[in-house]
Amino acid sequence: MEISTFELLVKRIAPPPADPAVARRVVQGYFLTIANLEDRDFTYQLEFHVSRPNPVDPDRNLAGNAFVAFDIAGENTTLALSPVMPSPVTPVFTTRFRLPAKQTASVQLLPDLTRPGLLNEANPDVEIRGFVRLRLPALRQGIFLRPQSNSPVKVLLNPEVRGTFLPNDLAARGGDFDQINYPLELASGKGLNEVEPDRGFFPIDPVIVSEVVNDRPPLDVINPPMIDLSLLSPTARAEVLAETLAQVDPSAENLNTVSDLLSKLEIPIRMEPVNR
């Protein structure tokens, strides 16, 4: 489900030629409060879909510019922020976290101020925006990915923007800075939401295509441990599926196994051997 938009900033509130004496720098992050209303623990996944800059600009990408912090009722824990490969229509970065039953957490997408020289730049220009999607991902059990629930899961959501204005004489000042904090509109229009669980599926793994037809080289795209087809565009999804199926050893046993898997995924394709 879509949650809201997001925007990260590390830049002056007014760009040059505005007088830098009055154009303070703002550091702005995205904060999501999420409560698991169910009676059991769940693993959630956030997807950050980033607007693609044109032309390419490293200051408009989450890679190297941001990190994710997670907190329930203690110190912040840093979560992995991973790019989706191969890239869908727009750059997508994901993070996962386990939220116990009836617990509330704060998940924060923040600018990485430890980037060398960032706060020393006269006119920093980190500006990254996009939208956020929440999923209840299927989890690996053996060789399958299985749904975490058979029904939608209830959550409470509250997205916010929080920012701090840094004075130009930062090194000479104390820690009392002006701040901003305002809520963002939820895509659903309400705080109480239900997240549909991802359906289980059979992941595309290197072992699945270890035996390939001699006249077809293995695909580079299947080298990662798993490809989540649900994150790809329809065209990319079809290409990955078609190329992978084309590399399966065409024995009757293998084709029957693949056909059964496709049937479970409700994909109307049946594979049968063809005499050449």
Image (cartoon, grey):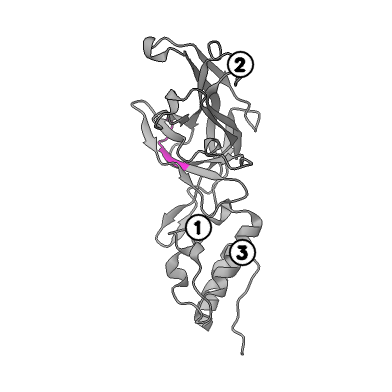
The relative height of residue 186 versus residue 254 in the rendered view (above or below) is above
Disc 2 designates what residue? Answer: 18
Disc 3 designates what residue? Answer: 239
Q: Given the image, on which type of amino acid does mark 3 rest?
A: Glu
- Verify CB contact (< 8 Å) between mark 3 and mark 2: no
Disc 2: CA contacts within 10 A as few (<14), some (14-19) or many (>=20): few
Q: Given the image, on which type of amino acid does mark 2 rest?
A: Ala
Alpha carbon of mark 1 to alpha carbon of mark 3: how far? Answer: 13 Å
Q: Position of residue 238 (x, y in %)?
A: 63, 62
Q: Residue furthest left?
A: 75
Disc 1: CA contacts within 10 A as few (<14), some (14-19) or many (>=20): some
Q: Earlier in the sequence, mark 1 or mark 2?
A: 2
Q: Residue at x 57, y 69 (%)?
A: 243
Which stretch did the figure color magenta? 95-103
- Verify CB contact (< 8 Å) between mark 1 and mark 3: no
Which quarter of the image is occupied by the N terminus?
top right
Q: Position of residue 6 (x, y in %)?
A: 57, 31
Counting every numbered tag in the picture gives 3
Residue 227 - label = 1
Q: Position of residue 96 (x, y in %)?
A: 44, 42
Alpha carbon of mark 3 to alpha carbon of mark 2: how far? Answer: 49 Å
Q: Given the image, on which type of amino acid does mark 1 rest?
A: Ile
Check disc 1 and report its element: helix, strand or loop.
loop
